[in-house]
Image (tube, helix red, strand yellow):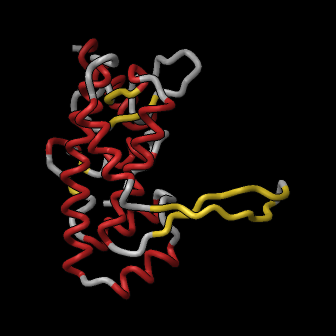
Amino acid sequence: MKPLFLANHPAIDFLNTHLAPDGRSVELLGTGTAFLEWLVAANLLEKKRALELARHTSGKALDSAAEEARRIREWMRAWLTRWRSSPQGDYRKEISALNTLLSRSTYRRLVVRGDGGLSVVERPQVEAAGALIGLVASQLAVLITHEQPELIKECANPACTLWFLDQTKSHRRLFCSASACGNRVRVAAFRHRQR
């Protein structure tokens, strides 16, 4: 199954790498290669750097990084669940753990020329598989410092396990996808009314 990028934020898209459509569990980060591919697809790592890392790193080290990513993902899910219900809670342990993860990757600033002129970009400097989780940690740091916890939502379709960041003007988004889950729920409600 291909990764889904419908959450409006890479940290939440990362949570959605484990999903359960129709009640069957699907793991999108089962291997180190899958983790690298997801980072590239999420625009958190350049494809060239991912290929270099894959060539110069053992499969065991990459698989170990993916295993850690899965553990961190569930830790993030638990933390964000608590943060949504209690934004003013005491999260010193979580913040300390996040800062430790952030220290595992470094970024280099570069000036680049684009269509709109010159701009400064930050590029990750990932030299080892263990630093990959720092890319995701940086997105979690941006999420918790720039977004409101009540805008992080779970899809209202009871059969769906996906999360999203509600960026609609009215903040009334209910579904991960209006055309998929939203439509399924409307059709089910219509059929129920017809009975």
Residue in front for this viewpoint, 184 or 91:
91
149 in relation to 65, above or below: above
Point 27% across, 12% down: residue: 193
Point 37% across, 69% down: residue: 36
70 in relation to 98, above or below: below
192 relative to 151 in the view: left or right: left
83 relative to 142 in the view: left or right: left
Where residue 56 sits, quadrant-wise, is: bottom left
127 in relation to 115, above or below: below
Residue 166: % across, % down? 47, 27
Point 53% across, 61% down: residue: 107
Residue 172: % across, % down? 47, 17
Image quadrant in which the C terminus is located:
top left
Residue in front for this viewpoint, 76 or 93:
93
Where residue 27 sits, quadrant-wise, is: bottom left
Residue 9: % across, % down? 47, 41
Image quadrant in which the N terminus is located:
bottom left
Residue 8: % across, % down? 49, 39
Where residue 112 sits, quadrant-wise, is: bottom right
